[in-house]
Image (tube, helix red, strand yellow):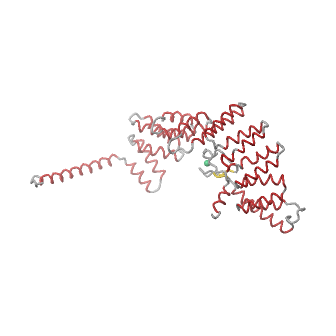
Amino acid sequence: MEFQFYWLLVLPLFFALGWVAARLDIRQLLTESRTLPAAYFKGLNFLLNEQPDQAIEAFTEVARSHQQTTELHFALGSLFRRRGELDRATRMHQALVDRSDLGSDQRLAAVHELAQDYLKAGLLDRAETLLEELRGTEYQESALRFLREIYVAEKNWDKAIATARAMAGRPGIDAPEREIANYLCEVAALDYVQGRENEADRKIAEALQANRRCVRASILQGEWRAREGHHRAAIDLWSRVEQQNADYLFLVAGLVMEAHRQLDHAQDGLRLIQAWLERYPGLDLLAQVYQATVDLQGPAAALSLVRNELHRTPSLPALEKYLEARLLVPADQSELFLRGDERTDVELMRSLLQRQVSRQSVFLCRSCGFKARKFHWHCPACGQWESYPPRRHVEIDDLSQTPSM
Ligand SMILES: [Zn+2]
């Protein structure tokens, strides 16, 4: 390509255009900073000096006098909600919802925020109305999650089930089939208590269809059969837990023993739960098998059982049970009977261990860390379903400290 002299003229022209553009930018920045109110900088200053309360007051002043600062309204609103100042959060978000100059995206965002304010304030019906508005919008997933929370709190199980079903298959939703099965168990239990036995059984079948590993469904139905005097059927239902999830067998071992006692087959029951323990070692199961062994075969048999378990899966609770069994052995079994100082020592060790073990023998919610003495299907603190692992904290601790072979 040949060099053209007029190109030399183009270069200074570009420089000139660049200079003008830069001037325009600076001028715009200056006008923008002049329109920012002094309170805004005051707020920033408070923030930098770690005085959040004063900063919030200053920003609130800006938001009040400058309605166009939409993002600031949103930020303050969610900040108020997080601080538990629900009145102020609600006012901030309600003002946004009421504004006619907002685009539909921002209005939906404001509705989404306001619904959360109402939810946190416990005004569930108001939250529900707003969340229903968000169906079919980009906030649908979050809205469904909140709606399900509301229906569970209201024990409106039909709506909870419908909502969980609508959520199924969406990304980031944790096992809705497990929750659906739990809701169906709730409905079934209510049906049974109110005398609708057939309906209750139908709901249990539905729960198992949603989640065939729903241990709770088998336990519930077994309890009903036992109450009706059908102990054999109850035992069969509870025995299904072994296939569904053997970690939960400790929840049915006591029930299975009682049903066998009712049938005058207590020894069969003991053999069954001893076989479970053999296959699935666990401390709660051990405690039940141990008690049944003491009752039916005496302390010496229980001592030998717990000694084997202690060697198989060493743990402090098993050691405590072992010492308890040692103390239970009667005087006529002289080689095992503890006397004098030896008995006093073992009693002391046992009571020390007992204190330590009982402090740690809790079920720990996987989701919020709430500690509970008894097992829950539904965390009373965070509302998650089946968030308690079927092992006590002390046991999980022991397992994690066992060196791997
Ligand atoms: Zn929890």
- In depth, the one of 143 and 248 nearer the eye is 248
Please say if 113 is above or below 284. Answer: above
> Left or right: where does residue 338 sit relative to residue 254?
right
What is the residue that sits farthest to the bottom in this orientation?
Answer: 341
- In depth, the one of 233 and 74 nearer the eye is 233
- In depth, the one of 30 and 354 nearer the eye is 354
In percent of the image, x 83 and y 68: which residue is there?
342
What is the residue that sits farthest to the right in this orientation?
Answer: 332
x and y percentages locating residue 106 in the rendered image: 42, 39
What is the residue that sits farthest to the left in this orientation?
Answer: 5
- Quarter in which the N terminus is drawn: bottom left
- Quarter in which the C terminus is drawn: bottom right
- Please give the count of numbered marks on the rendered protein: 0
Residue 68, quarter of the rendered image: top left
> Left or right: where does residue 54 sit relative to residue 300?
left
x and y percentages locating residue 64 in the rendered image: 42, 41
x and y percentages locating residue 26 in the rendered image: 27, 51
x and y percentages locating residue 274 in the rendered image: 76, 53
In percent of the image, x 23 and y 49: which residue is there?
21
